[in-house]
């Protein structure tokens, strides 16, 4: 599967809720519908909360990768 | 002194049996003070008027099922508190708003004023109390069940029914149990049975991160979930977190917990049934109250949990529950509620 290019990247691996969510939303605000945000966040609560919150809001998580350092790299297609 | 003496009969029902109340009717000598309007004694008997330390003063507990309040009712409560209270309100431990320092002569007009906005007085004493509920699925992101709807159902159908002792019901929208349903006489908690579909799973391991119970481990090579049903407490987090919706809700409904209470001798409730629909939950509540009333006959002031701890009572209760909702959803390994040991 070809890698989907990201339109914006943020590293929130030092953040926890609610900042992780706010920074992700602010980054999404800068994108148009259909564009892709790539982010890196910590395992555990951060990836758990971000996944749940984004799904609740109807955003699409289109790829998830576990990094060698244990962090998660998510790609999100903006949907509203 | 032109003291006008008037005899006023008033009975205060606070944790007392109906018979006892009759005997302690107070002949209040009211000097210079007439009761304003009529006092409806039937209303008083339903409780919700709690004697304060201060002479003639009562706390009037208002009914707020599920902690819900509308602006219309609130405005009327404010007006009533200005007129008949001391300007002070208190939020009770069970989500009721209470008007403090109300002189009992004013019960009549106070109740009338509140009624105009549809605000009823709550209850106290040995009866079904106002149900508690968290926000549930209405706006809380974790909410699985419609706790607010259930609180209204209980309020309409079961509120005020006479029982041996106080009878408290609480609804939590998910296993976080913010409303402490586990320590209510009847506690209903929203739950989901998660079901996994392999075909759509990408092995991303998010569900293993989402599950804080250790019920999901990731396969070391594929990343796909290995599910340990024993550890699952049906919280829905895996379902909500999975990006591909490979986890879905197989069953959704209320866990029914019975026999809990706090107080001097707290008791932890026990699980009697799982994944009840709203209708089944309502039937189970009705059956539980009916069983409590019957099994408690002649036993005086005893909480449901303490009754269930007596020999053979748990089995009798489960049989009544099976009659009401069928045996399928009943918990198999039944334990009685358990005392929580607290050192004082
Ligand atoms: S019990 Fe669950 S749904 Fe209710 S307030 Fe707590 S987290 Fe939210
Ligand atoms: S429902 Fe909750 S406890 Fe059960 S596996 Fe999913 S996340 Fe874990
Ligand atoms: S979150 Fe969903 S896609 Fe990812 S491993 Fe779990 S079941 Fe598979």
Image (spheres, coloured by chain):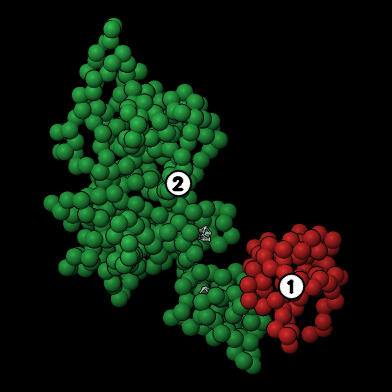
Chain colours: A red, B green
* Residue that protrudes farthest toward the top in the picture: B2
The answer as to whether the residues below labels 2 and 1 share one chain is no
**Front in this rendered view, residue B196 or B210:** B210
| Residue B198: quarter of image | bottom right
Identify residue for label 2.
B95
| Residue B258: quarter of image | bottom left
At x 23%, y 63%, the residue is: B308
Query: Quadrant location of the N terminus of chain B?
Result: top left
Alpha carbon distance from label 2 to label 1: 38 Å
Tell me the SS state at disc 2: loop
**Residue B13 seen in the figure:** yes
Reply above or below: B328 against B48: below
Q: Position of residue A18 (x, y in %)?
A: 68, 62
Say left or right for B334 vs A59: left
Give the label, 2 or 1, closer to the camera: 1
Instruction: Determine whether label 2 and label 1 are within 8 Å by CB.
Output: no
Reply above or below: B123 against B309: above
Query: Quadrant location of the C terminus of chain B?
Result: bottom left
Q: Position of residue B32 (x, y in %)?
A: 31, 13
Q: Residues within 10 Å of mark 1 (few under 14, many from 20)?
A: few
Q: Position of residue B163 (x, y in %)?
A: 24, 48
At x 49%, y 64%, the residue is: B176
Q: Position of residue A16 (x, y in %)?
A: 69, 68
Chain ID of residue with mark 2 = B
Identify residue for label 1.
A14
């Amino acid at each position: 599967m070809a890698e989907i290019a990201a339109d914006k990247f943020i590293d929130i691996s030092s953040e926890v809720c609610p900042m992780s969510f706010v920074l992700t939303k602010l980054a999404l605000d800068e994108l148009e519908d259909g564009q892709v945000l790539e982010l890196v966040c910590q395992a555990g609560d951060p990836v758990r909360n971000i996944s749940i919150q984004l799904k609740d809001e109807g955003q699409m998580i289109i790829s998830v990768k576990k990094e060698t350092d244990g962090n998660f790299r998510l790609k999100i297609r903006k949907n509203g | 002194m032109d003291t006008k003496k008037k005899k006023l009969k008033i009975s205060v029902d606070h944790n007392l049996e109906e018979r006892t109340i009759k005997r302690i009717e107070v002949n209040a000598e009211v000097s210079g003070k007439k009761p304003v309007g009529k006092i409806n004694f039937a209303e008083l008997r339903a409780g919700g008027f709690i004697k304060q330390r201060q002479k003639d003063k009562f706390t009037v507990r208002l009914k707020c099922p599920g902690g819900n309040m509308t602006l219309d009712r609130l405005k009327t409560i404010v007006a009533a508190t200005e007129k008949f209270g001391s300007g002070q309100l208190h939020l009770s431990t069970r989500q009721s708003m209470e008007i403090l320092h109300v002189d009992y002569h004013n019960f009549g007009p106070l109740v009338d004023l509140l009624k105009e906005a549809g605000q009823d007085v709550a209850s106290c004493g040995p009866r079904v109390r106002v149900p508690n509920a968290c926000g549930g699925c209405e706006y809380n992101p974790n909410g699985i069940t419609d706790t607010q709807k259930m609180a209204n159902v209980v309020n309409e159908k079961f509120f005020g029914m006479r029982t041996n002792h106080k009878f408290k019901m609480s609804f939590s929208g998910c296993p976080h149990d913010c409303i402490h349903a586990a320590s209510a006489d009847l506690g209903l908690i929203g739950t989901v049975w998660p079901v996994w579909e392999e075909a759509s799973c990408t092995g991303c391991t998010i569900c293993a991160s989402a599950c804080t119970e250790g019920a999901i481990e990731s396969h070391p090579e594929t990343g796909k979930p290995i599910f340990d049903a024993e550890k699952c407490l049906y919280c829905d987090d895996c379902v909500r977190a999975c990006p591909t919706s490979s986890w879905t809700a197989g069953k959704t409904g209320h866990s029914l917990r019975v026999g809990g209470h706090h107080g001097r001798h707290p008791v932890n409730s026990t699980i009697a049934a799982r994944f009840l629909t709203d209708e089944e939950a309502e039937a189970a509540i009705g059956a539980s109250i009916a069983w409590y009333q019957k099994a408690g006959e002649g036993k005086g002031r005893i909480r449901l949990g303490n009754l269930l701890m007596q020999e053979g009572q748990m089995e009798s209760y489960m049989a009544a529950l099976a009659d009401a909702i069928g045996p399928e959803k009943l918990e198999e390994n039944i334990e009685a509620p358990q005392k929580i040991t607290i050192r004082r």
